[in-house]
Amino acid sequence: MMTEQIRFGDRLFLPVLMAPYRLRADDPPQRKLWIYVLDPAGIGLKKPTQCVDIPYEPLGAEGIRGAVFEVEHAPLPSYLRKHLDWPDRLIQEFENKPLHLDEPRLAMSGGIAPCTGTPLFAGQMAYAVCQRVYESFTEALGRSPTWGPWAAHRIRNGEAATLRIQPFALEEANAYYDADSGTLKFGVFETVPDGSSNLLPGGLVMTTLSHDIIAHEVTHALLDGMRAHFRVNTHPDVPAFHEGFADLVALFQHFRYPSLVEQAIEDHGGLNSDMLLELGREFGEALSGVEGRSLRHAIQQTVLPGQSADSQPLSYTDAPVNEPHKRSGVLVSAIFSAYLQIYEGRAKELLRLANFATHGQQQRALPSELISLLANEATKIAEEFLNVCIRAIDYCPPLDVRFGDYLRAIITADRMLNKEDGTGMREALIREFRRRNVDLRKVRDLSEYSLEWNSPSPIDRPQIPGLAWSQLRFANDGLTAQSVAEVEQQAGALGDFLSFQLDQGSQLVSELGLTGISGDFGPITIESLRPVARRARNGRLLHGMVAEISQCCSTPDGPAWGGSTLVLTEEGQIEFAIRKRVDDEERLSAQRKNLRDSEGNPNFSFKHMHGLHDQG
C-alpha cells in the first residue's frame, strides 16, 4: 500500500530478499578458517594466528561466494606483482584458480595457513572476520542484519545482494566502505624507509590482513544497513559516531579470543595491554615510522596545551575534537573506560578469593587457573558491552545522532531487557559520559529514568492495529524470513495508522517528529519495519518490532529530513518514539548549512573520511 501520504522506502523489503544461508539437516554447523587475531606484525603474541569457527555455508568452486559476503577474485595488480616477484607460471595459476574452500583438503584443514605472501589468504581472512562481526550483530539485534540501499538496487537489477570484498583495491594507505557500490575496498602500501624496527623498510602492508581494519570497515557497512539517513552529515557528531562505533566493535572483537585475553592478563596482571586496547598497530607503525604507534587507542587521552598528563580526559567541548577521528575518541574512551571499571570490580572479587585460598600470601605470578577465570570474566563483560552497543542502534533517532543520543539509547536498550542495573554497567557509562562533558539536551538529571527515552505523551502508548505479534504469521524467533506479502501487510498497517493520525490532525504526528503533508513537506516514508526477539540476562525473551519513519523537507539548498524510530511492544504498542522533528527550524538551518558546504551532497564519504587517518 502506497498513497499520497505514505511511501515505502528502498530497504523495507530487504529482510525478505536477502538473508544468510539456512543450514540443511546434513550441513555441518560451523566452518573453521585460519586468521591473524590482530596484525601480521603482532610482536610478542604467543598465538598470533588461530583457526576460528564461522557459520557454515557452501561457497562453491569459483571463489568465496556466500549468501551475504563475496570476495572478488581479480588479477593481481602490478604493484603487488612487483613485491611478490612471482614467475609468470604462479601468476597465471593464481588468476585461473580462485580459492576453493569447499575442496575437502582445505575444508578439513581450516583453509589456507596464514601467510603474508599468499594473496589468496587475504580473501579468506577478510571473509572470516566479516562473518564473525556479522554474527555479533545477529546475536545482539535478534535478527539477521541487512545492507544499505545498494542492496535493493542490485536486487532490482537481478544481481546478488552480497557485500563485495576487494582485498587489493587500492595502492594507498587506506581502506573504506563504498556505500554506493556495496564494496569493502582494502589498500596495499609500502612502509616508510626509516621507521619501526618491527617492519621492513619499504616493505608491503596489506590492510586486508589486519583484523582491526576488517572489523572496522564491515561495521560501517552493517551500520549503513540499519538506518536510511545515518550518513546525513548534520553535525560533527555524525561522522565521529560512525568512526567511534566501528572502533568499539573492532576493539570488543579482541575479547572473542581467550588466548589473547589470557596473555594480556598474564603479562600485565590485567587488561592494560596494548594488544587489547589498540587498533591497527602495523598500519600505524608503517604509516608513521614510529615504533609502537597504533592507528588509535581505546583509552588514549589527548593532552592539550597547558594541561598536565594526569588531567581530565579529552572533553566533548574541547576545540580540537571536531575532526571525526579525534572526536570519536571521546565516545570510545567513555565506553571502554566504563568497561574497564566493571571488569576491575569483578577481578578484585576473584583476586580476593584467590588470596584467601592461599592464606593471603601474595604471588608474583598469577596461577593459570586464576588467569583463566579472569579472562573468562573479561570476555563475558566485553560480550555484554558489545551486545548493548549494537542493540542501542535500534533505540537511536533515525538521523542526526549525537553522542548524548547514543548514551540515552544504550540506557533505554538495556533497561528494556534488564530493569535492574545488576552489573553497574549503566552507572559506569553515565559517569564516564559526564566526565567528558558530553551534551545531554532535554534531560532533567543523570538518573536512568531521566536518560531513558520518553513514550509519546498525548496518548499512553498508542497501539497500532495489526502489529501485535499474536496477529503475525511468521515464527516468533526474529530470524525467520517473512514473505513480501507479510511485510507489505505490516507496513500497510503502520501506514494506515499514520494516515489516520494525519487526517485527524492528531498531536501524535508532532510527537513522531512529523508534520502535515503540504508545501515543502513531502509524504512520510516507512524506511524499515523489523521484528526482533531478544533475551535478557535472566533468560526472559522479549519480542517486539522496530520501525523507522522519515519525512523530507525541500529547501533551496536541497532535501532535509526528520522522523522517528518507533519501538513497538509485543502487543503492537508504541513503547518509544525517538524523534528528530522535521519542522525543527534550528535543525533545518544546520542541515541547510551542511548542504551548502557540501555542494548539495548531504552524505559524508567514508573514502574521504578514512583518507584523514593520519590526522586521527
Image (cartoon, rainbow, N blue to C red):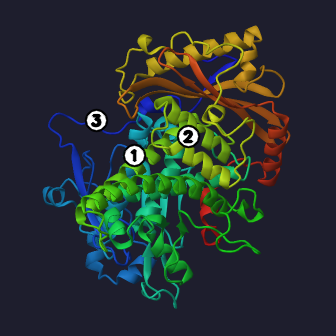
**Camera-side mark, 3 or 2:** 2
Measured along the vertical axis of the image, is residue 115 above or below residue 244?
below
Q: Which residue is mark 1?
A: 136
Per the rendering, the mark at residue 22 is: 3
Q: Reply above or below: 10 against 493.
A: below
Residue at x 74% of width, y 46% of height: 234
* For marks 1 and 2 on the same chain, the one whose residue lies earlier in the sequence: 1
Q: Amino acid at mark 2?
A: Ile
Given the image, on which type of amino acid does mark 3 rest?
A: Arg
Work out how far the residue at label 1 is from the one at label 2, CA to CA, in angstroms: 17 Å
The spot of residue 499 in percent (x, y) is 67, 13
Tag on residue 410? 2
Q: Residue at x 28, y 70 (%)?
A: 47
Q: CA distance from mark 1 to mark 3?
A: 17 Å
Camera sees residue 71: no
193 and 457: which one is in front?
457
Q: Earlier in the sequence, mark 3 or mark 2?
A: 3
Q: Judge from the rendering whether residue 131 lies leftward or rightward of residue 249; answer left or right.
A: left
- Residue at 64% across / 67% down in the picture? 612
Using the image as rendered, state which of residue 140 and residue 425 is in the foreground: 425
The kind of secondary structure element at disc 1 is helix
Q: Is residue 216 above or below residue 27?
A: below
